[in-house]
Amino acid sequence: MILIVIPILALLALTAVAVARIRDLWAAVMFMGIFSFLGASWMLILDAPDVAFTEAAVGAGISTFLMLGTLALTGKTEKPTKFSIVPLIVVGITGAALVYGTFDMPAYGDPNAPIQTYPNPSFVEKSEHDMHGLPNVVTAVLASYRGYDTLGETAVIFTAGIAVLLILRKNEVGEKESV
Amino acid sequence: MEYGFTLFGSAGYGFMQYGYIACSLAILVTMTLALIRAMLGPTVFDRVLALNMFGTKTVLLICVVSFLTGRQDFIDVALLYSLMNFIGMVALLRFSQLGYFGESENERTGATS
């Protein structure tokens, strides 16, 4: 298996470098599609088919469309920029912090990891009592145990929807043309 | 490994498993070549062909890996991948042909009546 995993990760890194280096934005969109396919394959090998499904549908499907739509409104090539060291440093520090953060995570497939041991007794058994007789476990988890999480997600999606509507709405008759 | 550690699982590979691994390696080599073509590709069509081939090879790789790990439900995901590959390809080609997504000229330029 490691023979398959290492080349996929190497291809991922290669594609990321290609996206960063290329100046033709049309090709960059294409490479983002490739990156998404590779990332989804990697998630699949990590035994997360649901995440891989989402990544393939959103990353390779919808975002390609959205990016191309954006390109249709803007331009196809990126302006040449001067090389600057600050973004490299920022990205390096952020990456190092993230890698440092993963050291505390349990090993992949560890039977003693919190995700294998923590919900015990399980939500299925205790949710009805906790929620004063609410029979639906999914509702209990989404609306109560993870209530703040769900609220945050809804707020994020709502904000994104408003922003997209504000950007994409058509100019009304008589309204000043916005640039 | 004593627990179901599929990522680097090694024990008990039979003849078929080695066949699957060889097959995946061959697919990965093809993917690398397609990626190189997509990077170098002077024209749009080189890149489009390379991307299409890359997507197809991803589908194949997922199928082979699903047989290797014995998780045949991965094949559903492979189906989704091939659909996505097709849709993305149509979008890219349409965009490269027209430069926009085929709305009417008035809509595109945002002209108001």
Image (cartoon, rainbow, N blue to C red):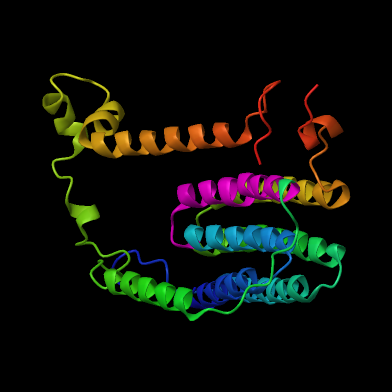
Q: Is residue B76 visible?
A: no
Q: Nearer the viewer, residue A52 or B24?
A: A52
Question: Which residue occupies 86% across, 63% down?
Answer: B45
Q: Nearer the viewer, residue A64 or A135?
A: A64
- Please state the extent of the stretch shown in magenta in the rendering: A45-72
Question: Which residue occupies 63% across, 34% down?
Answer: A168
| Residue A174: percent from left, percent from top | 70, 21
Question: Which residue occupies 56% across, 70% down?
Answer: A12
Q: Is residue B105 left or right of residue B39?
A: right
A58 inside magenta stretch: yes
| Residue A140: percent from left, percent from top | 24, 28
- The image quadrant that residue A94 belongs to is bottom left
Residue B64 vs A179, above or below: the answer is: below
A42 inside magenta stretch: no
Q: Is residue A152 visible?
A: yes
Q: Is residue B43 left or right of residue A61?
A: right
- The image quadrant that residue A139 belongs to is top left
Which image quarter is the C terminus of chain A in? Answer: top right
Q: Nearer the viewer, residue B77 or B111?
A: B111
Residue A23 vs A176, above or below: the answer is: below
The count of marks equals 0
Question: What's the magenta bit mostly, secondary-structure-wise?
Answer: helix
| Residue A17: percent from left, percent from top | 59, 74
Q: Is residue A9 left or right of residue A37?
A: left
| Residue B71: percent from left, percent from top | 50, 55
Residue A88 vs B56, above or below: the answer is: below
